Image: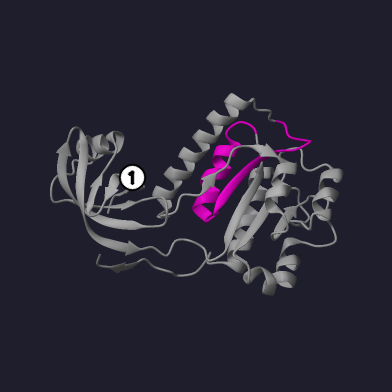
Amino acid sequence: MHRFYVSPQNINDRQVWLDLEQSRHIDRVLRLGPGDRVIIFDGLGQEYEIQLNGLQGGRVEGEIIQMLTPAAEPSLMINLVQGIAKGEKMDFIIQKAVELGTAAIYPFFSQHAVVKLEKERAVKKQERWQAIAREACKQCRRSRIPNVHQPCSLQTILEIVNGKPAIMLYENETRQGLKELLAEKRPSLTGEQELFLIIGPEGGFAPAEVEIARTRGVMTAGLGPRILRTETAALAALTIVLYELADLGSGKTIQIHMK
């Protein structure tokens, strides 16, 4: 069944309105009409099956048939804190991180960052990244759209973390790998509701940045003997943590109940 995003403001009791772009797609491309059914999600965690009633003012109107209880959100909120990568790498990281199950994405600048964004350009980038996150949710059947935050400094990130569980993946960390760290900290981490994963940009982290993070209580870990690109490191770390501490690899399904 086809699936679309609908803003919560366009869901009123049992009535639903789709935006102009999606309405055109439904009408002209998919050739769906009155009586056909689709799935919608509101980006806040709720899904509905609706029956289409037709076009009004160029927009498709529908009626909620039943509410769906999705099971696509991990029990542990994992926030990806990603050093801004150049070119299309950041788009790729955001798309795949959303598919894997990240709860939020915090792009940040650091000492060795290759990319520099002026304020106006940073706003446009954030809007693009948020749109990529929304489209990724449509594809992977997530009902809650992760928030892609405005780019900020590593210092600001550490203030946001502020004592919450956080792991910095550091290429020069040889004392402890992510696998060993998760095994050691599993009881405390699975008891938490939120975890930050901090990944450096192409140039990695400066030693001083790592030390500052450690003084703020951030744990450091390596990803093995091979040096990974930033986009590979982000997705590898997310996959490992979601597999070890959350639901990646499980067989959860979507439950249905009548509204």
Q: Which residue is mark 1?
A: 9
In the displayed image of the protein, which residue is found farthest to the bottom? 187
Query: Residue 194: horizontal and vertical position, in percent?
Result: 61, 61
Q: What residue is at 52 percent from the left and 56 percent from the top?
A: 101
Magenta region: which residues?
86-114
Q: Amino acid at mark 1?
A: Gln
Query: Residue 192: horizontal and vertical position, in percent?
Result: 63, 67
Q: What residue is at 49 percent from the left and 52 percent from the top?
A: 99
Between residue 28 and residue 18, name the one nearer to us. 18
For the question of whether residue 226 can be seen, the reply is yes
Quarter of the figure with residue 151: top right
Quarter of the figure with residue 189: bottom right
Query: Residue 86: horizontal and vertical position, in percent?
Result: 64, 32
Quick check: is 93 in the magenta stretch?
yes
**Mark 1 closeness class: few <14, some 14–19, many ≥20 residues within 10 Å:** few
Q: What residue is at 39 percent from the left and 68 percent from the top?
A: 253
Quick check: is 98 in the magenta stretch?
yes
Secondary structure found at label 1 = helix
In this rendering, would 23 be left or right of 217? Answer: left
Quadrant of the snapshot with the N terminus: bottom left
Between residue 166 and residue 139, name the one nearer to us. 166
Rendered position, 65 above or below 185: above
Query: Residue 246: horizontal and vertical position, in percent?
Result: 56, 67
For the question of whether residue 6 can be seen, the reply is no
